[in-house]
Image (tube, helix red, strand yellow):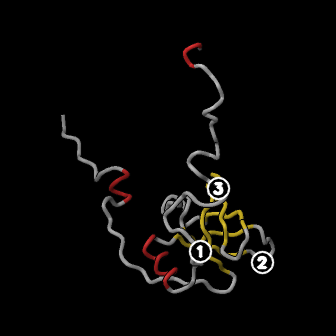
Amino acid sequence: MPKQAKGKGGKNKRRGKGVTREKRELEFKEDGQEYAQVLRLLGNGRLEANCFDGQKRLCHIRGTMRKKVWVYVGDIILVSLRDFQDEKADVILKYAADEARNLKAYGELPVHVKINEADFGEGSDSDDNIEFDTDAGVDLSAI
């Protein structure tokens, strides 16, 4: 029986395992673009983002970013606004944490923005605003 030739590797070989990210030049927003922070992921390449012009928009992750750049809740992104639909936008770029800090230092992002924190927004506390009454008079030994 002849020996089987070894393959060149599986999907990890094609994907490029252990590839280090090189520094890229910081991209600032232009006309028709806005900075935003991801509120929640909706699936199917869509997400809800809070743009820093004060609007929540439904954003679509463009095809070149899909399955290559992973976007999470709390990430700072650059979106392209649509001329014909003000409530929708397209994700152009995801900023790394150090790039977002640089944008904040340059004054491009508002001061109140929390970078790399998923706990933001409408009162998302860990206890979900639940209070227990300790003086309710319930006898646990009777249960």
Q: Nearer the viewer, residue 109 or 40?
A: 109
Q: Residue at x 59, y 78 (%)?
A: 110
Q: Nearer the viewer, residue 136 or 29?
A: 136
Determine the image quadrant of residue 93: bottom right
User: Residue type at mark 2?
Assistant: Asp
- Percent x, y for residue 130? 64, 42
In this rendering, the answer to whether 46 lies above or below 80 is above
The secondary element bearing badge 1 is classed as strand
- Label 3 near label 1: C-beta < 8 Å? no
> What residue is shown with label 3?
123
> What residue is shown with label 2?
83
From the viewer's perspective, is the residue at label 2 or at label 3 nearer?
3
What number is the disc on residue 78?
Answer: 1
Q: Residue at x 67, y 71 (%)?
A: 51
Q: Nearer the viewer, residue 29 or 115?
A: 115
* Disc with the residue nearer the chain's start (2 vs 1): 1
User: Residue type at mark 3?
Assistant: Gly
Q: Residue at x 56, y 57 (%)?
A: 119
Q: Decide if residue 29 is on the left or right side of residue 18.
A: right
How crowded pointer 1 is (Cα within 10 Å; few <14, some 14-19, many 20+) is rated as many
* Disc with the residue nearer the chain's start (1 vs 3): 1
How crowded pointer 3 is (Cα within 10 Å; few <14, some 14-19, many 20+) is rated as few
User: Residue type at mark 1?
Assistant: Leu
Q: Decide if residue 92 is on the left or right side of residue 99.
A: right
- Percent x, y for residue 3? 19, 40
Q: Distance of mark 2 from mark 1, alpha carbons?
A: 16 Å
Q: Decide if residue 69 is on the left or right side of residue 125.
A: left
